[in-house]
Image (cartoon, rainbow, N blue to C red):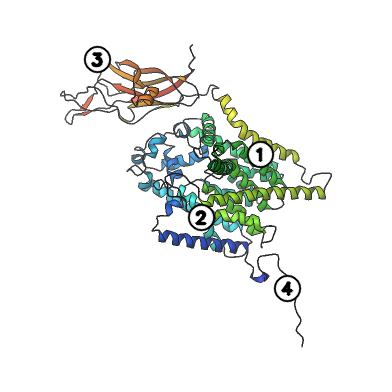
Amino acid sequence: MMQQKVKTTRAPGLRLDKNRRLTPMQIYCWATVVCLAVLLLALLASRGALLHRFFFYDVTDTGMDFFHSIEYTRGRMPYGQFDTLYPPLANLFFYVLYLLVPKTQSATWTESFISSLNMKGTERDLRLQQATMMLFIVFVIVVVLGIVSMTERLTRSCGGRKELLAFCAVFSYGVLYGLERGNILLLCWPLMAFFILYRNSENPLLRELACLALAIAAGFKLYPAFLGVLLLRDKNYLAAVRTVLYGVVCLCFPLFFFNEGLFGLTLWFRVLFDFSGSRGEPWIGNGFSNILAEAGHAVDKLLGTQLGYGSYALLGIVLAAVLLVCSFFMDKEWKRITAIILAMLMFQSQYDYVWCLFLIPLFLFMEQERELRRDNVLPYLALMVPVLPLPMFRRDQWEPSFVPRNTICHAMLLLLIVWCFVQTVQGVRVRCAEKPVKPAHGHPAATVLLAVCVAVAGVGGQQLWQHTHNWGFDYSYNGRLDAEGIRQKDVQDSDGNPVEVTWSGRGAYIMIYNHAPFTQRMTVTFQTGYGMDLKRAYTMTFELPNQKKAADTGEAQKLNTTDIKIDHEGQTVCYTVDVAPGQTQIDVSYDGPMAVYDASSRKSGTFTVTNLVVASEGAVEETE
């Protein structure tokens, strides 16, 4: 009997036998497990010495974005006092966490950015305290639960073991790096996934919660707002309007919990633009400007040029706008999300935790593309490689540095950008072929408007700040008394013995913040409180250190010394000084004794200061 010969044809996937072909989910899980195994072996071989070369270079500052953000809300001036980058809603979130910290602990924290950095490794370090460490542990638990839950929902109809996929998601590079930093972007991840899944739900409550989730995510980290273009593409304009309203509330409402008020928005924009334009090594990061700076830096090493320090931020903004427009012409959800996530990365400089966002389009790919083909294998690899915990380590040095991982990931980004352009061209051709007279979706005007709005928001924002920073904003919140303890001059107890006393609460010096780019005339006003021994008038002295002289000679020379006589409790003290942009310290001293309430223990009484106001009288007129 002759055996019939069966002709074998090559399947469009990765294997000849279709039944044995690995799915995209299996490939990703196997790759993650292998990378984790190699990484673990490398760490074991080095006795853990390679760990700090895998994560952030400062081994003493783990969880920095979480712990420092709690510190920055202490004085309720996160922008003027600490120059924080987080939006107002994120600051409100950390302020709530600050309220959960015992006062005995938070009272020892510093009140300036540089001083807070000096707390690392000391007994005041938040990482050494039970309350703040428990808050961080809860943060990690919530993040992991949110990622696991949304991972299962993003791949609900996809076969395979969801438990292993969730494990791989938690141990992806972006999530691990974000946990080490304690970055709030990890809280945005499940909110963004929730919006993508339920924005078109048949349940009206889920649809509304999806819009609210996007607004909260944008309030935490700003650029998740780019996902709002999905509502425009869906022609769900009412939902888009409601989401914008939610976003405005999330942006403005938290400001009323801080002393900066609505002026905090102006301060925040200034901090954002200063941060984007003041990077010491502009090629460190994952934005489009960083990619161009990296290429320019490579040329600099060969030719001795300065291309690596060029200004490429505008190109990143334009590219982000173009990618958002491209998302309108793509035929599948995972493709649209890929273009939008790319726009988030290209918009401004991002650190490595941003790679966690690639998990969303990758999981949607697994849901909608059950096998790999020639037309989808390249975007799949470009999405998968950046999220893998590749066992690659940076140089052992105390500064940010590049590793081959960065170059590989940047190559994947460029590949995805080109792929998005190709997909857009194909989408436009298909639409023209189907309806050559009338566009399929009939919203080219909305597309053009979107691109214009993104470009104007990015490019015009800095110009807007430069022309509106002196529109008469209220600067009355711009001062405080620091709790350093002011030393009295020639103070004696009831027996005539010299003693050292301090003001209760806050004293020592007044710190004034001038957020305008010009010199302002500031007036410091407060009332003296109880506890003064006023048998005669005593003197309170205000001294302004010469900052310019201090920078030149290393010594803080005194000038503008002003003496004010104090002769009764409740006396209003008023001191006027011209303050240059930035922060200025006014030293205060008092030469009178304090009332003695407990003669047996020879303890001095307390002297309070109430109703402190630092108000601006406007710009100082220039004199020739």
Dot placed on the residue nearer the N-terminal end, 2 or 3: 2
Asked if the residue at tag 4 contacts the one at tag 3, i.e. Cβ–Cβ closer than 8 Å, the answer is no
Q: Which residue is mark 1?
A: 241
Q: Nearer the viewer, residue 353 or 600?
A: 353
Q: Which mark is residue 8?
A: 4
Q: Residues within 10 Å of mark 1 (few under 14, many from 20)?
A: some
Find numbered disc 3 in the image and state the secondary structure of the residue it sits on.
loop
Q: Nearer the viewer, residue 547 or 334?
A: 547
Q: Nearer the viewer, mark 2 or mark 3?
A: 2
Residue type for callout 2: Leu
Find numbered disc 2 in the image and state the secondary structure of the residue it sits on.
helix
Dot placed on the residue nearer the N-terminal end, 1 or 3: 1
Q: Nearer the viewer, mark 4 or mark 1?
A: 4
Which residue is found at the position 58% from the left and 61% from the top? 28
Measured Cα–Cα span from mark 2 to mark 3: 67 Å
Measured Cα–Cα span from mark 4 to mark 2: 47 Å
Measured Cα–Cα span from mark 1 to mark 3: 67 Å
Dot placed on the residue nearer the N-terminal end, 4 or 2: 4
Q: Which residue is mark 2?
A: 145
Measured Cα–Cα span from mark 2 to mark 1: 31 Å
Residue 509 point in image, percent of width and height: 35, 26
Residue type for callout 4: Thr
Dot placed on the residue nearer the N-terminal end, 3 or 4: 4
Q: Which residue is mark 3?
A: 536
